[in-house]
Image (cartoon, coloured by chain):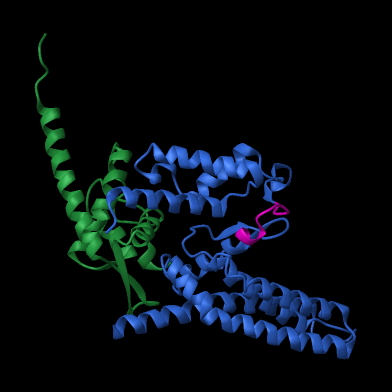
Chain colours: A blue, B green
Amino acid sequence: MNTPTEHRRQEHADYVRQVATHLRARGRARTRALDDLREALAETPDPESFGPAATYARSVDEELGTGRFLSTILGIPNSLAPGVLDRLAQTFDPADERLVVPHVLGIGWAINVGRLAVRLGLLNPDDLDDEVLARATHGPGRVVRWATYGTATAAGVRALRQASPSVGAAAIASAAVAALAEDRALPPRQRLTLAATGLGIAAAGLGLPVRDGSQRTTTTALGWAIVVWCAATYLPVRVQINRETVRSATA
Amino acid sequence: MSPRHQAPRHQAAPGTPTQLRKGALELAVLALLSRQPSYGFQIVEQLGDHAGLQASTGTIYPLLTRLKNAGLVETTWHESTQGPPRKYYRLSPDGERHLAEQARAWQELVATMAALLTEPEETP
Protein backbone atom coordinates (compact mmCIF):
# COMPACT_ATOMS: atom_id res chain seq x y z
CA MET A 1 0.00 0.00 0.00
CA ASN A 2 1.18 3.53 -0.74
CA THR A 3 1.66 5.60 2.38
CA PRO A 4 0.85 9.31 2.06
CA THR A 5 4.59 10.08 2.06
CA GLU A 6 5.28 7.59 -0.73
CA HIS A 7 2.32 8.93 -2.65
CA ARG A 8 3.63 12.49 -2.34
CA ARG A 9 7.12 11.40 -3.36
CA GLN A 10 5.72 9.67 -6.41
CA GLU A 11 3.66 12.75 -7.30
CA HIS A 12 6.79 14.88 -7.11
CA ALA A 13 8.78 12.42 -9.25
CA ASP A 14 5.99 12.37 -11.85
CA TYR A 15 5.90 16.15 -11.93
CA VAL A 16 9.69 16.40 -12.36
CA ARG A 17 9.49 13.82 -15.17
CA GLN A 18 6.76 15.81 -16.93
CA VAL A 19 8.74 19.04 -16.62
CA ALA A 20 11.84 17.25 -17.98
CA THR A 21 9.82 16.18 -21.03
CA HIS A 22 8.98 19.79 -21.87
CA LEU A 23 12.20 21.46 -20.76
CA ARG A 24 14.35 22.53 -23.68
CA ALA A 25 17.41 23.55 -21.68
CA ARG A 26 20.30 21.12 -21.99
CA GLY A 27 23.51 20.30 -20.13
CA ARG A 28 24.31 21.78 -16.73
CA ALA A 29 21.50 24.33 -16.92
CA ARG A 30 18.99 21.50 -17.30
CA THR A 31 20.43 19.42 -14.46
CA ARG A 32 20.47 22.42 -12.15
CA ALA A 33 16.92 23.49 -13.08
CA LEU A 34 15.57 20.01 -12.32
CA ASP A 35 17.57 19.79 -9.06
CA ASP A 36 16.14 23.18 -8.03
CA LEU A 37 12.65 21.94 -8.81
CA ARG A 38 13.14 18.80 -6.68
CA GLU A 39 14.32 20.97 -3.77
CA ALA A 40 11.38 23.33 -4.16
CA LEU A 41 8.92 20.43 -4.33
CA ALA A 42 10.30 19.00 -1.10
CA GLU A 43 9.08 22.15 0.63
CA THR A 44 5.53 22.03 -0.70
CA PRO A 45 2.83 19.39 -0.34
CA ASP A 46 1.21 20.13 -3.65
CA PRO A 47 2.92 20.14 -7.08
CA GLU A 48 -0.19 21.81 -8.52
CA SER A 49 0.93 25.06 -6.93
CA PHE A 50 3.71 25.04 -9.56
CA GLY A 51 1.14 25.01 -12.36
CA PRO A 52 1.04 22.70 -15.40
CA ALA A 53 4.42 21.06 -16.12
CA ALA A 54 4.58 22.49 -19.66
CA THR A 55 4.01 26.04 -18.36
CA TYR A 56 6.62 25.60 -15.63
CA ALA A 57 9.17 24.26 -18.14
CA ARG A 58 8.44 27.15 -20.50
CA SER A 59 8.99 29.72 -17.75
CA VAL A 60 12.30 28.08 -16.79
CA ASP A 61 13.42 28.07 -20.43
CA GLU A 62 12.49 31.74 -20.72
CA GLU A 63 14.41 32.55 -17.57
CA LEU A 64 17.46 30.61 -18.76
CA GLY A 65 17.18 32.08 -22.25
CA THR A 66 17.16 28.61 -23.81
CA GLY A 67 17.50 29.00 -27.57
CA ARG A 68 16.49 32.64 -27.20
CA PHE A 69 18.29 33.70 -30.37
CA LEU A 70 16.31 31.11 -32.30
CA SER A 71 13.07 30.75 -30.38
CA THR A 72 10.99 33.36 -32.22
CA ILE A 73 11.26 35.57 -35.27
CA LEU A 74 8.82 38.50 -35.16
CA GLY A 75 6.79 36.51 -32.66
CA ILE A 76 6.61 33.41 -34.86
CA PRO A 77 8.04 30.27 -33.23
CA ASN A 78 11.29 29.14 -34.78
CA SER A 79 12.06 25.60 -33.82
CA LEU A 80 15.63 25.24 -35.06
CA ALA A 81 16.58 24.42 -31.51
CA PRO A 82 17.10 21.31 -29.36
CA GLY A 83 14.06 19.22 -28.47
CA VAL A 84 12.89 18.07 -31.91
CA LEU A 85 11.47 14.79 -30.57
CA ASP A 86 9.66 16.58 -27.75
CA ARG A 87 8.08 18.97 -30.23
CA LEU A 88 7.19 16.08 -32.51
CA ALA A 89 5.41 14.39 -29.59
CA GLN A 90 3.50 17.63 -28.92
CA THR A 91 1.86 17.31 -32.33
CA PHE A 92 -0.20 14.38 -31.02
CA ASP A 93 -1.23 15.23 -27.48
CA PRO A 94 -5.00 15.13 -26.84
CA ALA A 95 -4.50 16.35 -23.26
CA ASP A 96 -2.77 19.55 -24.43
CA GLU A 97 -5.45 22.21 -24.84
CA ARG A 98 -3.46 23.97 -27.58
CA LEU A 99 -4.63 23.26 -31.11
CA VAL A 100 -1.51 24.82 -32.62
CA VAL A 101 1.95 24.14 -31.24
CA PRO A 102 5.42 25.29 -32.32
CA HIS A 103 6.61 23.69 -35.54
CA VAL A 104 8.71 20.56 -35.10
CA LEU A 105 11.58 21.90 -37.18
CA GLY A 106 11.49 25.30 -38.79
CA ILE A 107 9.57 28.54 -38.54
CA GLY A 108 5.87 28.62 -37.71
CA TRP A 109 3.32 26.36 -36.11
CA ALA A 110 2.05 22.81 -36.42
CA ILE A 111 -1.39 21.36 -35.68
CA ASN A 112 -1.79 19.32 -32.52
CA VAL A 113 -3.59 16.45 -34.23
CA GLY A 114 -4.42 14.86 -30.87
CA ARG A 115 -6.37 17.95 -29.86
CA LEU A 116 -8.00 18.09 -33.28
CA ALA A 117 -9.18 14.51 -32.73
CA VAL A 118 -10.69 15.60 -29.40
CA ARG A 119 -12.45 18.52 -31.09
CA LEU A 120 -13.84 16.13 -33.70
CA GLY A 121 -15.09 13.79 -30.98
CA LEU A 122 -12.70 10.99 -32.02
CA LEU A 123 -10.76 10.89 -28.74
CA ASN A 124 -11.24 12.01 -25.14
CA PRO A 125 -8.55 14.25 -23.64
CA ASP A 126 -7.59 11.71 -20.98
CA ASP A 127 -7.50 8.65 -23.26
CA LEU A 128 -3.74 8.51 -23.65
CA ASP A 129 -2.20 7.79 -20.29
CA ASP A 130 1.28 6.25 -20.17
CA GLU A 131 -0.08 2.71 -20.02
CA VAL A 132 -2.35 3.01 -23.06
CA LEU A 133 0.32 4.84 -25.05
CA ALA A 134 2.94 2.20 -24.23
CA ARG A 135 0.58 -0.61 -25.27
CA ALA A 136 -0.45 1.26 -28.44
CA THR A 137 3.20 1.75 -29.36
CA HIS A 138 4.24 -1.85 -28.69
CA GLY A 139 1.15 -3.39 -30.30
CA PRO A 140 -0.65 -1.58 -33.14
CA GLY A 141 2.27 0.86 -33.45
CA ARG A 142 4.47 -2.03 -34.54
CA VAL A 143 2.27 -2.45 -37.63
CA VAL A 144 2.98 1.19 -38.52
CA ARG A 145 6.73 0.55 -38.28
CA TRP A 146 6.47 -2.57 -40.47
CA ALA A 147 4.34 -0.61 -42.95
CA THR A 148 7.07 2.04 -42.99
CA TYR A 149 9.78 -0.49 -43.81
CA GLY A 150 7.59 -1.97 -46.55
CA THR A 151 6.72 1.41 -48.05
CA ALA A 152 10.35 2.55 -47.80
CA THR A 153 11.43 -0.57 -49.67
CA ALA A 154 8.84 0.11 -52.40
CA ALA A 155 10.04 3.73 -52.62
CA GLY A 156 13.66 2.48 -52.82
CA VAL A 157 12.79 0.16 -55.71
CA ARG A 158 11.05 3.04 -57.47
CA ALA A 159 14.07 5.27 -56.89
CA LEU A 160 16.39 2.68 -58.48
CA ARG A 161 14.11 1.99 -61.45
CA GLN A 162 13.53 5.63 -62.22
CA ALA A 163 16.94 6.90 -61.09
CA SER A 164 15.42 9.46 -58.74
CA PRO A 165 17.71 10.78 -55.98
CA SER A 166 14.83 12.57 -54.20
CA VAL A 167 12.72 9.40 -53.98
CA GLY A 168 15.81 7.45 -52.86
CA ALA A 169 16.51 10.02 -50.13
CA ALA A 170 12.89 9.76 -48.92
CA ALA A 171 13.17 5.95 -48.80
CA ILE A 172 16.38 6.05 -46.76
CA ALA A 173 15.11 8.82 -44.44
CA SER A 174 11.82 7.02 -43.74
CA ALA A 175 13.58 3.74 -42.90
CA ALA A 176 16.01 5.61 -40.63
CA VAL A 177 13.18 7.38 -38.79
CA ALA A 178 11.27 4.10 -38.37
CA ALA A 179 14.44 2.47 -37.01
CA LEU A 180 14.77 5.31 -34.50
CA ALA A 181 11.16 4.64 -33.43
CA GLU A 182 12.23 1.11 -32.43
CA ASP A 183 14.22 2.55 -29.52
CA ARG A 184 12.31 1.40 -26.42
CA ALA A 185 14.14 3.94 -24.28
CA LEU A 186 12.20 6.75 -25.97
CA PRO A 187 8.88 7.88 -24.46
CA PRO A 188 5.95 6.07 -26.16
CA ARG A 189 4.50 9.27 -27.61
CA GLN A 190 7.81 10.05 -29.33
CA ARG A 191 7.99 6.51 -30.71
CA LEU A 192 4.41 6.73 -32.01
CA THR A 193 4.91 10.07 -33.77
CA LEU A 194 8.34 9.04 -35.10
CA ALA A 195 6.91 5.89 -36.70
CA ALA A 196 4.09 7.92 -38.23
CA THR A 197 6.62 10.43 -39.56
CA GLY A 198 8.61 7.59 -41.14
CA LEU A 199 5.50 6.26 -42.86
CA GLY A 200 4.55 9.78 -44.00
CA ILE A 201 7.99 10.30 -45.56
CA ALA A 202 7.85 6.89 -47.25
CA ALA A 203 4.38 7.66 -48.64
CA ALA A 204 5.66 10.99 -49.95
CA GLY A 205 8.59 9.12 -51.54
CA LEU A 206 6.20 6.88 -53.43
CA GLY A 207 4.22 9.87 -54.65
CA LEU A 208 7.02 12.31 -55.52
CA PRO A 209 7.22 13.28 -59.21
CA VAL A 210 10.38 12.00 -60.91
CA ARG A 211 10.10 13.55 -64.36
CA ASP A 212 8.37 16.40 -66.17
CA GLY A 213 4.84 15.72 -67.26
CA SER A 214 4.16 13.40 -64.30
CA GLN A 215 0.56 13.49 -63.12
CA ARG A 216 1.68 13.28 -59.53
CA THR A 217 2.82 16.58 -58.11
CA THR A 218 4.94 17.34 -55.11
CA THR A 219 1.96 19.01 -53.45
CA THR A 220 -0.12 15.87 -53.80
CA ALA A 221 2.73 13.80 -52.38
CA LEU A 222 3.00 16.09 -49.36
CA GLY A 223 -0.77 15.99 -48.92
CA TRP A 224 -0.64 12.20 -48.86
CA ALA A 225 2.19 12.34 -46.33
CA ILE A 226 0.07 14.46 -43.98
CA VAL A 227 -2.99 12.21 -44.35
CA VAL A 228 -0.85 9.12 -43.75
CA TRP A 229 0.78 10.76 -40.71
CA CYS A 230 -2.58 11.59 -39.13
CA ALA A 231 -3.88 8.06 -39.74
CA ALA A 232 -0.66 6.47 -38.47
CA THR A 233 -0.87 8.33 -35.15
CA TYR A 234 -4.61 8.06 -34.57
CA LEU A 235 -5.35 4.50 -35.69
CA PRO A 236 -2.89 2.64 -33.41
CA VAL A 237 -4.27 4.57 -30.45
CA ARG A 238 -7.87 3.92 -31.42
CA VAL A 239 -7.20 0.22 -32.00
CA GLN A 240 -5.60 0.00 -28.56
CA ILE A 241 -8.56 1.81 -26.94
CA ASN A 242 -10.91 -0.70 -28.58
CA ARG A 243 -8.76 -3.54 -27.24
CA GLU A 244 -8.85 -2.04 -23.76
CA THR A 245 -12.64 -1.75 -24.01
CA VAL A 246 -13.00 -5.40 -25.04
CA ARG A 247 -10.61 -6.42 -22.24
CA SER A 248 -12.67 -4.45 -19.69
CA ALA A 249 -15.90 -6.00 -20.95
CA THR A 250 -14.56 -9.56 -20.67
CA ALA A 251 -12.79 -9.06 -17.32
CA MET B 1 -16.57 21.31 -29.93
CA SER B 2 -18.08 18.22 -28.40
CA PRO B 3 -20.69 19.02 -25.71
CA ARG B 4 -18.89 16.56 -23.46
CA HIS B 5 -15.98 18.98 -23.28
CA GLN B 6 -17.74 22.21 -22.58
CA ALA B 7 -16.80 24.29 -19.58
CA PRO B 8 -18.17 23.29 -16.16
CA ARG B 9 -21.53 24.75 -15.19
CA HIS B 10 -20.16 27.07 -12.53
CA GLN B 11 -17.13 29.25 -12.52
CA ALA B 12 -14.99 29.40 -9.39
CA ALA B 13 -16.64 31.52 -6.75
CA PRO B 14 -15.01 34.95 -6.49
CA GLY B 15 -12.64 35.08 -3.58
CA THR B 16 -12.45 31.29 -3.17
CA PRO B 17 -9.05 30.67 -1.63
CA THR B 18 -7.24 28.87 -4.43
CA GLN B 19 -4.73 27.06 -2.25
CA LEU B 20 -7.46 25.70 0.05
CA ARG B 21 -9.40 24.47 -2.96
CA LYS B 22 -6.36 22.82 -4.53
CA GLY B 23 -5.55 21.04 -1.30
CA ALA B 24 -9.08 19.66 -1.11
CA LEU B 25 -9.40 18.69 -4.76
CA GLU B 26 -7.66 15.33 -4.57
CA LEU B 27 -9.76 14.31 -1.58
CA ALA B 28 -12.91 15.53 -3.35
CA VAL B 29 -12.12 13.46 -6.45
CA LEU B 30 -11.44 10.36 -4.35
CA ALA B 31 -14.71 10.93 -2.48
CA LEU B 32 -16.66 11.23 -5.74
CA LEU B 33 -15.07 8.06 -7.08
CA SER B 34 -15.98 6.20 -3.88
CA ARG B 35 -19.64 6.84 -4.72
CA GLN B 36 -19.49 5.60 -8.30
CA PRO B 37 -16.99 5.01 -11.10
CA SER B 38 -16.89 8.05 -13.38
CA TYR B 39 -15.15 9.23 -16.53
CA GLY B 40 -12.93 12.29 -16.55
CA PHE B 41 -15.34 14.92 -17.77
CA GLN B 42 -18.10 13.53 -15.55
CA ILE B 43 -15.85 14.21 -12.55
CA VAL B 44 -15.28 17.78 -13.76
CA GLU B 45 -19.06 18.22 -14.02
CA GLN B 46 -19.70 16.68 -10.61
CA LEU B 47 -17.14 19.00 -9.02
CA GLY B 48 -18.81 21.89 -10.81
CA ASP B 49 -21.97 21.17 -8.82
CA HIS B 50 -20.15 21.92 -5.57
CA ALA B 51 -19.40 25.53 -4.77
CA GLY B 52 -15.70 26.14 -4.30
CA LEU B 53 -14.61 22.87 -5.93
CA GLN B 54 -14.92 23.88 -9.59
CA ALA B 55 -11.93 22.78 -11.62
CA SER B 56 -11.01 22.70 -15.27
CA THR B 57 -10.22 19.59 -17.31
CA GLY B 58 -6.62 20.85 -17.41
CA THR B 59 -6.47 20.39 -13.63
CA ILE B 60 -8.49 17.20 -13.25
CA TYR B 61 -7.00 15.06 -16.03
CA PRO B 62 -3.38 15.37 -14.76
CA LEU B 63 -4.68 14.78 -11.21
CA LEU B 64 -6.41 11.56 -12.35
CA THR B 65 -3.23 10.46 -14.10
CA ARG B 66 -1.23 11.02 -10.93
CA LEU B 67 -3.79 9.10 -8.85
CA LYS B 68 -3.61 6.25 -11.33
CA ASN B 69 0.20 6.23 -11.33
CA ALA B 70 0.07 6.19 -7.53
CA GLY B 71 -2.16 3.11 -7.63
CA LEU B 72 -5.06 4.88 -5.90
CA VAL B 73 -7.45 4.58 -8.83
CA GLU B 74 -8.00 1.92 -11.48
CA THR B 75 -9.43 2.39 -14.94
CA THR B 76 -11.83 0.40 -17.07
CA TRP B 77 -13.11 1.19 -20.54
CA HIS B 78 -16.74 1.18 -21.59
CA GLU B 79 -18.47 1.79 -24.89
CA SER B 80 -20.20 5.14 -25.13
CA THR B 81 -23.40 5.95 -26.97
CA GLN B 82 -21.73 9.23 -27.96
CA GLY B 83 -18.26 9.13 -29.45
CA PRO B 84 -15.34 6.86 -28.61
CA PRO B 85 -15.17 4.47 -25.63
CA ARG B 86 -14.74 6.21 -22.31
CA LYS B 87 -12.23 5.55 -19.60
CA TYR B 88 -13.92 5.16 -16.21
CA TYR B 89 -12.00 5.69 -13.00
CA ARG B 90 -12.76 3.85 -9.76
CA LEU B 91 -11.02 3.57 -6.41
CA SER B 92 -8.52 0.76 -5.97
CA PRO B 93 -8.29 -1.00 -2.59
CA ASP B 94 -5.26 1.22 -1.83
CA GLY B 95 -7.33 4.23 -2.86
CA GLU B 96 -10.13 3.26 -0.48
CA ARG B 97 -7.69 2.99 2.42
CA HIS B 98 -6.04 6.28 1.42
CA LEU B 99 -9.43 7.99 1.24
CA ALA B 100 -10.37 6.71 4.70
CA GLU B 101 -7.10 8.00 6.17
CA GLN B 102 -7.35 11.35 4.41
CA ALA B 103 -11.02 11.77 5.37
CA ARG B 104 -10.17 11.14 9.01
CA ALA B 105 -7.30 13.63 8.88
CA TRP B 106 -9.56 16.14 7.14
CA GLN B 107 -12.29 15.82 9.79
CA GLU B 108 -9.74 16.37 12.54
CA LEU B 109 -8.34 19.40 10.76
CA VAL B 110 -11.80 20.86 10.19
CA ALA B 111 -12.69 20.41 13.87
CA THR B 112 -9.41 21.99 14.97
CA MET B 113 -9.76 24.92 12.58
CA ALA B 114 -13.41 25.47 13.52
CA ALA B 115 -12.47 25.63 17.17
CA LEU B 116 -9.55 27.92 16.44
CA LEU B 117 -11.60 30.28 14.31
CA THR B 118 -14.51 30.50 16.74
CA GLU B 119 -12.56 30.86 19.99
CA PRO B 120 -12.88 34.37 21.39
CA GLU B 121 -9.70 36.38 21.59
CA GLU B 122 -8.12 36.35 24.98
CA THR B 123 -8.07 39.73 26.64
CA PRO B 124 -4.73 40.71 28.17
> What x and y, as percent, mark residue A63?
60, 37
Front residue of this view, candidates A29 and A200: A29
- In the image, what residue occupies the spot 63% across and 38% down? A64
> What x and y, as percent, mark residue A172?
78, 77
Q: Quadrant of the C terminus of chain A?
A: bottom left
Front residue of this view, candidates A26 and A214: A26
Q: Quadrant of the N terminus of chain A?
A: bottom left
Front residue of this view, candidates A177 and B53: A177
Please name the predominant secondary structure of the magenta segment in the image: loop
- In the image, what residue occupies the spot 58% across and 84% down? A143
When the figure is inspected, residue B115 is found, relative to residue B69, above or below; the finding is: above
Displayed quadrant of residue B72 = bottom left
> What x and y, as percent, mark residue B54?
29, 50
When the figure is inspected, residue B66 is found, relative to residue A142, above or below; the finding is: above
> Would residue A180 appear left or right of A6 to someone viewing this image?
right
Span colored in magenta: A78-87
Front residue of this view, candidates B10 and A243: A243
When the figure is inspected, residue A216 is found, relative to residue B8, above or below; the finding is: below
Displayed quadrant of residue A200 = bottom right
